[in-house]
Amino acid sequence: MMSKLKTKLFLAAVLFAGTTSLALAQADNTNSKIAPANFSGWMTDYSKANNGRISRDAYMQEAGRRWDAMDANRQGLTVDQINQLYGYRPSSAGSGSMAPAPTK
């Protein structure tokens, strides 16, 4: 039978290993919370790091992560909110317009 000290050391090692691997996975995750604020910026950064290409899986995961962040109540998004995901803003043309966001 393991002593209490050995048990505590074992649990500490397991927790450390799990935390470390989780942190490393997060750092390499294309869907991390430190992704650029706009989708276009994420696509540019991701493609630069991946031979100019974005896999369907990476794109869909990032789109889903951004959707879920905006739709915390799971009520769905409006057309304007979806356009906002892509960096577009509503224009005077009415809801659903895909006018580009102003540049600074």
Image: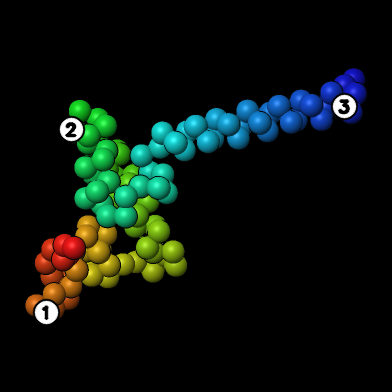
Report x, y in % for residue 14: 69, 28
Report x, y in % for residue 58: 30, 39
The kind of residue tagged 2 is Gly
Q: Is mark 1 on a helix, strand or loop?
A: loop
Question: Camera-side residue: 24 or 54?
Answer: 24
Earlier along the polypeptide chain: callout 1 or callout 2?
2
Q: What element carries label 3?
A: helix
Left or right: residue 24 compared with residue 40: right
Question: Camera-side residue: 53 or 38?
Answer: 38
Q: How far apart are marks 1 and 3 (CA)?
A: 69 Å
User: Is residue 98 visible from the viewing direction of this image?
Assistant: no
Earlier along the polypeptide chain: callout 1 or callout 3?
3
Residue ID for mark 1:
92
User: Is residue 60 visible from the viewing direction of this image?
Assistant: yes
Residue ID for mark 2:
52
Tell which residue pokes out farthest to the left in this image: 93
Tell me what residue is drawn at x 24 percent, y 30 percent: 50
The kind of residue tagged 1 is Ser
Left or right: residue 98 compared with residue 3: left
The kind of residue tagged 3 is Leu
Tell me what residue is drawn at x 26 percent, y 32 percent: 49
Tell me what residue is drawn at x 11 percent, y 67 percent: 99
Tell which residue pokes out farthest to the top in this image: 1
Tell me what residue is drawn at x 44 percent, y 64 percent: 72
